[in-house]
Amino acid sequence: MAAGEGSLGVTVNSFTSVSLDPPLVSFALDRKGGRAQPFVENGHFCINVLAEDQVGLSKKFAAPGHITCEAVGHDIGPAGSPVFSGILAAFHCRLETTMDGGDHIILLGHVGDYAFDPCKQPLVYFRGGYAGVQD
């Protein structure tokens, strides 16, 4: 989630751990529709890893257009980005750099802080649908 007035949220299908030292993660956003630019301009963001009971939240931010976080209850994380309630994990990131990814822009974030709820299970999107994780 990009921070600021009218903080923008977007559902991505994956993000990747790039490095442990320094702690870096990446994800890609489609260049079309203007959703990537606020993340680039803002300079920091929070990756909210949704819990298995948050399908509605995932669908909300996967819808086309600009969806702001003000429509959903949230707190503000240490870098000023929105953090949703009930999530599995939050990665508070400073934008390190961006890279060309064809019709996507790849954002590389430096993780400054994180939180994790060991009692939650992740929301999984697999083969075109939401699924649970089996123990």
Image (cartoon, rainbow, N blue to C red):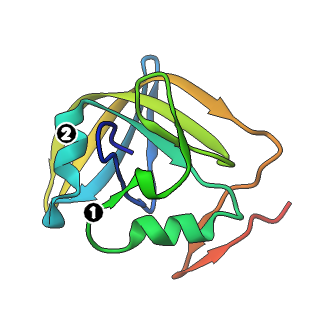
Circle 1 residues within 10 Å: few <14, some 14–19, many ≥20: some
Q: Which residue is mark 1?
A: 66
The answer to which of 123 and 54 lies nearer the viewer is 54
Quarter holding the N terminus? top left
Q: Which residue is mark 2?
A: 40
Q: Which mark is nearer the camera, 1 or 2? A: 1
Please state the horizontal and vertical placement of residue 134, each as a whole percent of the image.
81, 65
Residue 19 in view, yes or no: yes
Do labels 1 and 2 touch, CB within 8 Å? no
**Occupied quadrant, residue 35:** bottom left
Which residue: 83% across, 45% down?
119
Please state the horizontal and vertical placement of residue 117, each as a whole percent of the image.
74, 39
**Mark 1 or mark 2, earlier in chain:** 2
Q: Is residue 68 found left or right of 127 in the rendered image?
A: left
Q: Is residue 57 above or below residue 41?
A: below
Q: Is residue 73 above or below residue 89?
A: below
Helix, strand or loop at disc 1?
loop
Residue 17 in view, yes or no: no
Residue type marked 2: Val
Which residue: 30% across, 74% down?
64
Distance between the alpha carbons at the discs numbered 1 and 2: 15 Å
Which residue: 30% across, 53% down?
28
Residue type marked 1: His
Which residue: 48% across, 22% down?
78
Q: Is residue 14 found left or right of 106 in the rendered image?
A: right
The answer to which of 85 and 36 lies nearer the viewer is 85
